[in-house]
Amino acid sequence: MNSHPMVPSAAKFIRNLSLRERNTFGLEANAELAYEITAADQIPAVMGEILRQQLSWRVLGGGSNVVLPATLRGATLLMNIPGQEIISADAQSTLLSVRGGVIWHELVAWTLENDLPGLENLALIPGTVGAAPIQNIGAYGVELAQYIHSVQAFDIRTQTLTTLPKEACQFAYRDSYFKQQPNRFIVTNVVFEIPKEWQPRIHYADLAQQFSNNPTPTPEEIFLAVCKIRTQKLPDPKIIGNAGSFFQNPIIPVEQYETLLLKYPNLVSYPDIAGKRKLAAGWLIGQCCLKGERMGNVGVYEKQALVLVNYGNGTAQDILGLAKCIQEKVKKEFGVNLEIEPNIL
Ligand code: EPU
């Protein structure tokens, strides 16, 4: 019998760590002091040290939704907490607890192998489980929030690990309480509630097309179809640096949408909450003749205008310069503001 109290493990730290391999844009970035977090109980000591030394700090998950500067001063927390387990199951649903460092796509594949379908439309989204609730990842008609039970996070204000039930997370399109309160929470664990009842969601145009001859696909078939569509449309970060959609699809008042529709009858849009309409930003950018446009080391991806790419030696300034140019052109043509999706550190 071990009568010693549980002693928290200590986080490893590394000085001057290159993050080039840890951000999908492939930007050269040097972290002055990087802490590798492999267990939630390491966070209080690390944050205590950061506050004591009054260092600036930020958290990096899979690095798939960030634009990094050449130097990250102060501390960078690399979230690598592994592990997952089913915590309970009843006739209605299964509760699955997953640590923040688990790779999102690996989790999706694991749920299907373990007969827990539901997340298949979210296959191949880059990044980690811990980052997923922050921007409420979504694709092909499904949003993460639909499967969240609760989120555990270290709250900087109270210096404690806290559990936020789904309602407290304030999920919305590409948004959450965590995103609204920057530098307050470090997500350590996500509990998913996966209903036993399953139905295919193939109404999204690209998927509907894939299944035009098969109205009752299996979860595995949907998983493979989503992987195929994403592979065809989105650049593989291992080959060409990118952070997925660089802009959010703008949500505008219905009156503004109707006025735009008179001038642009082919305008691509989706229904949104009452009185609002969501526009396909990729279409707006394409109409400004920017698809495939290159500006030095960076450019607009030729198959999906919503994605900005780094051809090799691009910097944060290059990417933000291109983004500004796109925002200005779209504003001038359509009177619509495009909001940047990734975190600009
Ligand atoms: N479109 C164009 N030109 C383009 C891109 C899109 O005309 O260059 C039009 C087409 O009509 C197309 C429609 O817009 O059918 C929708 O395009 P797509 O299916 O590629 O979806 P999206 O609205 O551009 C959103 C998400 C993606 C997600 C897809 C699929 C945002 C910001 N992006 O893109 O998420 O994979 O839907 O559900 O909501 C990400 O966030 O990184 C991401 C890739």
Image: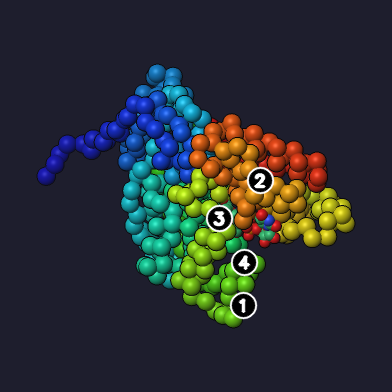
Q: Which residue is mark 2?
A: 293
Q: Gap in Å between the C-alphas at discs 1 and 2?
A: 33 Å
The location of residue 312, given as percent across then percent down, is 50, 40
Residue under the image location 62 percent in, 66 percent down? 206
Instruction: Say if disc 4 is inside 8 Å of ligand 1.
Output: yes
Q: In the shown orientation, is residue 200 left or right of residue 18?
A: right
Using the image, determine if residue 254 lies above or below residue 221: above
The location of residue 122, given as percent across then percent down, is 51, 59
- Number of residues whose C-alpha sits closer than 10 Å to that of mark 3, classed few (under 14), some (14–19) or many (20 or more): many
Q: Gap in Å between the C-alphas at discs 1 and 3?
A: 22 Å
Q: Secondary structure at mark 1?
A: loop
Q: Is residue 186 visible?
A: no
Residue extending furthest toward the top:
53
Q: Is residue 36 visible?
A: yes
Residue 209, quarter of the rendered image: bottom right
Q: Which residue is mark 4?
A: 206
Residue under the image location 42 percent in, 40 percent down? 22
The amino acid marked with disc number 3 is Leu
Q: Secondary structure at mark 4?
A: helix
Q: Which residue is mark 3?
A: 234
The amino acid marked with disc number 1 is Ser
Q: Secondary structure at mark 2?
A: loop
Q: Gap in Å between the C-alphas at discs 1 and 4?
A: 10 Å
